[in-house]
Image: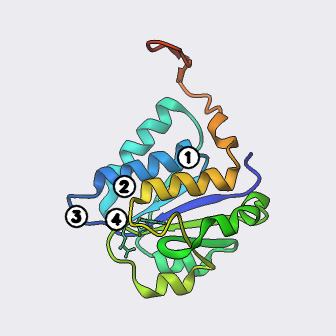
Amino acid sequence: MKDIKVKVLRLGHRPGRDKRLTTHVGLVARAFGADEISLSKDDEKVKESIIDVTKRFGGNFKVEINDEWKQTMKNWKGDIYHLTMYGEKISSYEEKLKKRDKDVLIVLGAEKVPRIVYDLADYNISVTNQPHSEVAALAIFLDRLFDGKELNLDFDGEIKVIPQAEGKYIEKN
Ligand SMILES: C[S@@+](CC[C@H](N)C(=O)[O-])C[C@H]1O[C@@H](n2cnc3c(N)ncnc32)[C@H](O)[C@@H]1O
């Protein structure tokens, strides 16, 4: 499935309130098949949490701390998708996304997103035109990008969850 590079760029956050949400953005990015996330310098603790999950549950997910988000957007060689409730419907992009012909940078906001983000993005995409959450928007976007294949990724970690009809069963390597 890893035919392209997929990076998530999480723009700033509201101090104190959004650390858990930023952690969830990172965990969804990892679990749903992205390669990397870029966080702001306030997010060192969030980085540690995500790396800890990756160590235990596997995969090669990377966490970068970088406040130069404009440079990240300007220097990106593939397509840039900014997820926003004001954008064009994701359903218009499903065929393009499935092709996965270029690396993908997915930009997510927290508080109000500066105008320049809309201009630097190649595509401003909405997952419904209702306000909701960056976690939900990211999950749906990655699912459309990977066409559902991300649901069966094997992370080959120290801990492996064996699906059960009832109760919990894990294997430890
Ligand atoms: C709490 S929302 C902030 C929305 C805010 N009104 C704004 O100016 O964009 C945080 C982030 O979630 C994502 N988001 C929320 N609703 C969305 C939607 N319907 N479609 C796509 N992304 C959405 C966007 O990336 C947004 O920046």
Dot 3 or dot 2, earlier in sequence: 3
> Quarter of the picture for ligand 1?
bottom left
Indicate the position of residue 13 as horizontal and vertical percent values.
31, 66
Q: Secondary structure at mark 2?
A: helix
Residue at x 44%, y 43% (from the top left corner):
51
Which badge, 4 or 1, is on the more N-terminal residue? Answer: 4
Residue under label 4: 41
Q: Which residue is mark 1?
A: 61
Q: Of residues 132 and 14, which is closer to you in this image? A: 132
Q: Which residue is the site of mark 3?
A: 15
Callout 1 amino acid: Phe
The crowding category of the residue bearing disc 3, from other C-alpha atoms within 10 Å (few below 14, some 14 to 19, many at least 20), is few
Q: CA distance from mark 4 to mark 2?
A: 12 Å
Question: What whole-number distance in Å separates the C-alpha atoms at marks 1 and 2?
Answer: 15 Å
* Residue 90, picture quadrant: bottom right
Label 2 belongs to which residue? Answer: 22
Q: Residue at x 49, y 58 (%)?
A: 137
Q: Amino acid at mark 4?
A: Lys
Front residue of this view, candidates 133 and 155: 133
Q: Quadrant of residue 60?
A: top right
- In the foreground, 64 or 126: 126
59 above or below 82? above
Describe residue 70's horizontal placement relative to residue 114 as left or right: right
Marks 3 and 2, how far apart at CA: 11 Å
Callouts 1 and 3 close, C-beta under 8 Å: no
Across and down, in percent, residue 128 comes to 50, 65
- For discs 4 and 2, the disc positioned in front in the rendered view: 2
Q: Give the SS element for disc 1.
A: loop
